[in-house]
Amino acid sequence: MTKTLIIIPSRMAATRLPGKPLLKINNLSIVSHVFKRAEETNIGEVVVATEDQEILVDVLKNGGRAILTRNNHKTGTDRIFEAYKKLDIKDVDYILNLQGDEPDINKDDIINLNNFMINRDAELGTLAAKIKDVKMLNNRNVVKVIVENKLDGNNFPNALNFTRENLSKNNKNIYHHIGIYSYKTSVLEKFVTLEQTNNEKKNKLEQLRALDNNLKINVALAKSSPIGVDTEEDYMDIKKIMEYKI
């Protein structure tokens, strides 16, 4: 049976909203919301990887599992690889990197990505959602992915490019990229040995390192775009949505 491990990288030192993992929604921290959403998928073990003792304590207090990592990682992927090695869990086939700042991500989308990875024997996969507001196309804070074929829920095509640039004049197979990744363990081990490319550093998108090194990234269609908490405004928006649901 295929074994998937979910690792959630999280740290206090976010550039635009420091301390965001511990901001509360319905009296529960954002990172613990993500942990519980991941657990609800029943895909496999879930662990938060963090450099901060405060996050570790919060996750444990709320019934989760967490592990301390170094504080000098350049990317979240490097952090999850260190956690994977430290955890020393045997026979893991896939490692799913779930963002720690998307507390309302749809659990079915996570399950769907995991199923695609296993059924297609894919090496590296991610999610994308339809763009419903054209303003997103020229918003540099929104990462767009261009795929080789139109996403329809049943296919898992290759990503051609990821960008923050204005794509309002291009309307062919562009989707809102959702920052969740599933790696075959062997591919993750290869990825972290690769040097950061100029393309990656210029655009601040580590997935470009994979494409620059001819690693294929397959894309599955997500039902919705979760709100990533990057700013105070994002936090207030997601807080209203999630607290209204209760």
Image (cartoon, grey):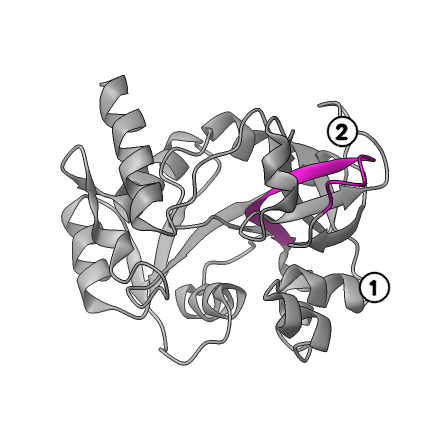
In the drawing, what numbered circle is on residue 97?
Answer: none
Which residue is depicted at the point 17% across and 32% down? 26
The answer to whether 82 is drawn above or below residue 222 in the figure is below
For discs 1 and 2, the disc positioned in front in the rendered view? 2
In the drawing, what numbered circle is on residue 214?
Answer: 1
Residue 181: say if magenta: yes
Amino acid under label 2?
Leu
Query: Can you identify the residue that label 2 sits on?
Result: 151
Q: Nearer the viewer, residue 43 or 52?
A: 52
Crowding near the residue tagged with mark 2, few <14, some 14–19, many ≥20 C-alpha atoms within 10 Å:
many
Which residue is depicted at the point 66% across and 46% down? 144
Which residue is depicted at the point 71% across and 45% down? 145
Crowding near the residue tagged with mark 1, few <14, some 14–19, many ≥20 C-alpha atoms within 10 Å:
few
Residue 153: say if magenta: no
Where residue 223 appears, x then y in whole percent?
A: 57, 24
Q: Is residue 60 left or right of residue 238?
A: left
The answer to whether 145 is drawn above or below residue 39 in the figure is below
Q: Nearer the viewer, residue 8 or 121?
A: 8
User: Hey, which quadrant is residue 211 in on the image?
Assistant: bottom right
User: Hey, which quadrant is residue 198 in on the image?
Assistant: bottom right
Which residue is depicted at the point 40% across and 38% down? 38
| Residue 174 can be seen, yes or no | yes
Q: Secondary structure at mark 2?
A: loop
Q: Is residue 56 left or right of residue 117?
A: left
Where residue 16 appears, x then y in whole percent?
A: 36, 61
Q: CA distance from mark 1 to mark 2?
A: 22 Å
Amino acid under label 1?
Asn
> Which span is picked out in magenta?
167-183
Which of the image's four quarters has the C terminus? top left
Q: Is residue 227 left or right of residue 57?
A: right
Q: Earlier in the sequence, mark 1 or mark 2?
A: 2
